[in-house]
Amino acid sequence: MPSIEEILLSETEKTFQYDNDLLTLPVPDLSNTLRKYLESVRPLVTDAEYKKTELIVQQFAAGDGKGLHEKLQEKAHTTRNWLEQWWEDEAYLKIRLPRPKINMGSPCPYDDIWQSLPGSQIPRQALVLYYLLKFWDYVRREKYKPLKDGKGRPQCMYQFRRVFNTCNIPGVSRDSLIHYFKTESEGACPSHVLVASKGHIFILDTHDEAGQILTPPELQSQLQKIKDRSLALGQAQGVNYFTSEERTRWAEIRSRLIALHPHNYENLEKIQSSVIGVWLEDGNGTDATDLANKGLLGCGDNRWWDKGLSSGMYENGLCISNADHTPAEGVMMVYVTQYILAKLRENNGKWQGSENIRSLPEPELLEFVLDDHLRNAVEQAKNNYAILSQCATAEVLKYTRYGKNYCKQIKIHPDVYCQLAMQLAYYTLYGRMAPTYQTAPIKQFYHGRTETMRTCTSEAKAWCIAMQDPSVQNAEKLKLLLAAVKKHSSDFAEACEFRACDRHLLGLLLIAREEGLPTPELYQDPSFYKSGGGGNFILSTSCLGYSPLVGAVLPMCTNGIGAFYSINEEWLIFNLTTWNEDQDTSSERFAEAVSNALDTLRSITDQQFPVTSARL
């Protein structure tokens, strides 16, 4: 069996060698965009509302839309990706919400190797950190094999540059991303990591004088020094809590920190340029649901929420991660975690190399110069985070009755299967359909990120209604299901080729703003919001591929549900999130509904290709 290095690395292809040759992001055809938009509106509005919207769209196509489309085409002629900066600004950098409400959090799926074990925090974190640094080193040396899609087309690897040595810098009205990462051929790159323990911030050099990564025993020794010193130091300054504040407030605090003393800027620079953040967390983790909640909104003592990627370990050796969504999609966490998991499985969760520990420099404790105003701001930030940390709840559902293998046998793609199960779950709970966002990758394009596939289709609605009607025969339910599957598959394929509607509609709206033009009626029509426009998707969903990792973000809107899932051969796993302020939604209740929907689906799909339990 090949090693994970043999699978992931290449001696003949460099990680970023195809990036500059990728397709320029096109401007989609306007008529197709508007057709797709109307299709997505139809299952979510009344006949009268649809008729009104249809007229608005016709007028838009002949008037405002035509002119804006031409202006967007002009803009597209001047750049390889006309959407890139707009998307980063509108989806992330201009948002004033605290970072914990936007970041991605995850339990790490190492439970088949590592169960809860008191006293295992430091050795396990050292091994995870070592493999994280190995992954970083492979990307630095451009050994990581360029990704390709099912058609053999190279995929954009740009996000591999943006996960490490990256930090989000707060601004008064717009944040900014700062990147310190460089490949070996581009020059020197910072190799230290930020380590936080008991709220104290340390800088740990991870390489020796020859530029080699410290061994896990050496990293363990350094982490233990940090742990011991943090215990002896007592109460921390609490500066970490500033990063959990509303962004404009954090920007103002940061400016005061820098103005107060040059040492503060030096500290910030060390934090910002670090490869990743490492959290030595107090207390223990329990199950996947507990770790999912801790990954998203756990104790704020150690967390520098602006870091591109952070890894946390509890005292009983259970692991979480958190990442800024601005520089990269959640699938980047999957790539990193899959490598770590494969290495842990190869060595049964234990370091197999030298146990020798050389004499190493002491980790550096970062201390800020604070005045009374900033010390008061720390206390206020702590109080704010105490409230913020209770704002949402995650629930992890591990569905073990079947998985990818069953879906293959009945010839329904498992991703489509999961999406339709969630449509049925929502309809069963609420008696109505929900505008739904599914992430569709468009990485065959230069700096391509995602398009939205609107998965609430008229075909899915017809099937959900039939599933709740006892007078409808199972054969008819199966027929309607297969029609919904066909429609979903077709729409997803189109979205992955950048032929959906959301990004194009966003571009037309933003070009109107840039030109100082009035907002077209299409964007003020109630149907625009009812179908998910303006960030109003009730279900925000994404498939994290074929892995045990199941990270999540919080829902787009107050009454929404975040639904993120991974597909495995004999099981499916969902990480579901809801806001606590909305009494009508519950991640736990939705998890139960999804489980029931998967059971119900099985009762229908078994009719197409009967499969006995023994064959599963």
Image (cartoon, helix red, strand yellow):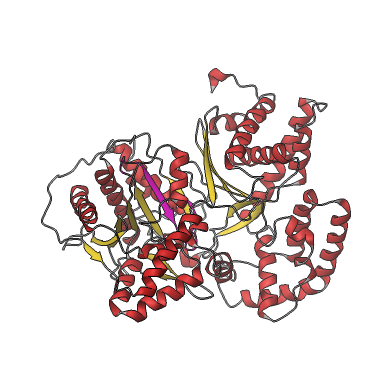
**Dividing the picture into quarters, in which one does residue 255 lie?**
bottom left
Q: Residue at 84% x, 65% y: name it.
A: 56
Q: Is residue 272 visible?
A: yes
**Dividing the picture into quarters, in which one does residue 66 lie?**
bottom right
Bounds of the magenta span? 315-331
- Image height of 410 relative to 225, above or below: above
**How many numbered discs?**
0
Q: Position of residue 35 (x, y in %)?
A: 78, 58
Q: Position of residue 552 (x, y in %)?
A: 51, 49
Front one among 535 and 12: 535
Q: Position of residue 97 (x, y in %)?
A: 54, 64
Q: Is residue 11 visible?
A: no
Front one among 280 and 470: 280
**Dividing the picture into quarters, in which one does residue 594 lie?**
top right
Quadrant assignment for the N terminus: top left
Magenta-colored stretch includes residue 347: no
Q: Magenta part mainly helix, strand or loop?
A: loop
Q: Residue at 66% x, 73% y: name it.
A: 510
Q: Position of residue 303 (x, y in %)?
A: 38, 58
Left or right: 145 as drawn, with respect to 608: left
Quadrant assignment for the C terminus: top right
Front one among 6 and 472: 472
Q: Residue at 41% x, 71% y: name it.
A: 178
